[in-house]
Image (spheres, rainbow, N blue to C red):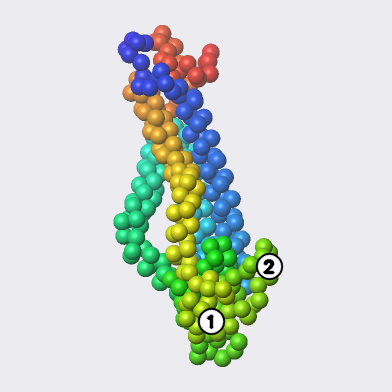
Amino acid sequence: MSNNDGVRYCDRFSYCLLKFILFAYSIIFWLIGGFILAIGIYAEVERQRFKTLEGVFLAPAVILILLGIVMFIVSFIGVLASLRDNLTLLKVFMYTLAVCLILELLGGILALVFRNQTLELLNKTIRKGIVNYYDDLDFKNIMDFVQRKFKCCGGQEFKDWSVNMYHNCSAPGPLACGVPYTCCITTKPNEVANTMCGYEVLKEERLNLINTIHIRGCTDAFFIWLMDNYKIMAGLLLGILLPQLFGVIVSWLYITRVEDAISEYGYYMDGLLHSNTLKREAKRQGRVSKWCKCMPEID
């Protein structure tokens, strides 16, 4: 084989550069995954300590734990694969990233195509959470934040709060037929809302409450916010998808380099590429391919 034959992509990417990029990429996401996992475990311990609702419904702690585990394991495979030049691990890493990327794209496309069903499912999920609003602190914090941030009340509409046992009109107590104070309209920045401002609003007609509470449902308010801030959402989506695509491309290029070296010299022992052996063999034959030039000299 002459030097002019060249190994695939030798002119563009060196073996060492791709190895370093893949290793750095895997290490960064491995550390991020471990950090997310640690936060999720801490949040779940706190959730159990305060005896909030059992189960995983809309529990950010559980979502963080699952996300952290996936990122930690997949990235760790990438770290090992890049260090050991193990083709099996490299392909597992690449295919896992590709599958995750495809599933995310398909999920987004299906959510857009079946947006009415998605909206209905979201409203049902919110109503289910409203039922346990005072028992599940995770959902309560999320719902309060959403209602303040998007100036909304309930899921589909403010009357969704009637499914809560404390806000139902047949319930005893001051919360009956009312809504949480996070639904209330505030006219000044950092104004402390009257906690009883939602008193018996479920008995009133929608138009009579426009100066008292936010009558728009949170699902509608959220989608309106998405439409108004499409640039931010596009940037967020690209920030999630592009790193995965980058990882797939780098993994694929690195796999081709490893396969080139194996096919050129025929050394592949126990799934590991022995660069020193390849270097010696290349020197013995009086030829050093471009990808070998980045390896340390061997006496």
| Rendered image: mark on residue 14 | none
The structure residue drawn at horizontal position 53% and vertical position 63%, both measured from the top left corner, is: 150
C-beta proximity under 8 Å, tags 2 and 1: no
Q: Tell me: residue 185, above or below residue 62.
A: below
The structure residue drawn at horizontal position 54% and vertical position 65%, both measured from the top left corner, is: 151
Amino acid residing under circle 2: Glu
**Rendered location of residue 157, percent (x, y):** 45, 73
**Rendered location of residue 32, percent (x, y):** 56, 46
Separation of disc 2 and disc 1 at Cα? 21 Å
* Front-most of residues 76 and 61: 61
**Rendered location of residue 185, percent (x, y):** 59, 70
Can you say which quadrant of the picture contains the N terminus?
top left
Amino acid residing under circle 1: Val
Q: Which quarter of the picture shows residue 39?
A: bottom right
* Front-most of residues 118 and 247: 118
* Front-most of residues 44 and 88: 44
Residue 131 visible (yes or no): no
Q: Tell me: residue 216, above or below residue 78.
A: below
Q: Tell me: residue 48, above or below residue 84.
A: below
**Which residue position holds label 1?**
201
The structure residue drawn at horizontal position 50% and vertical position 31%, both measured from the top left corner, is: 21
* Tag 1 secondary structure: helix
**Rendered location of residue 94, percent (x, y):** 39, 40
Mark 2 and mark 1 lie on one chain; the one further toward the N terminus is: 2
**Which residue position holds label 2?**
191
Badge 1 crowding class, 10 Å Cα cut-off, few under 14, some 14 to 19, many 20 or more, is some
* Front-most of residues 168 and 246: 168
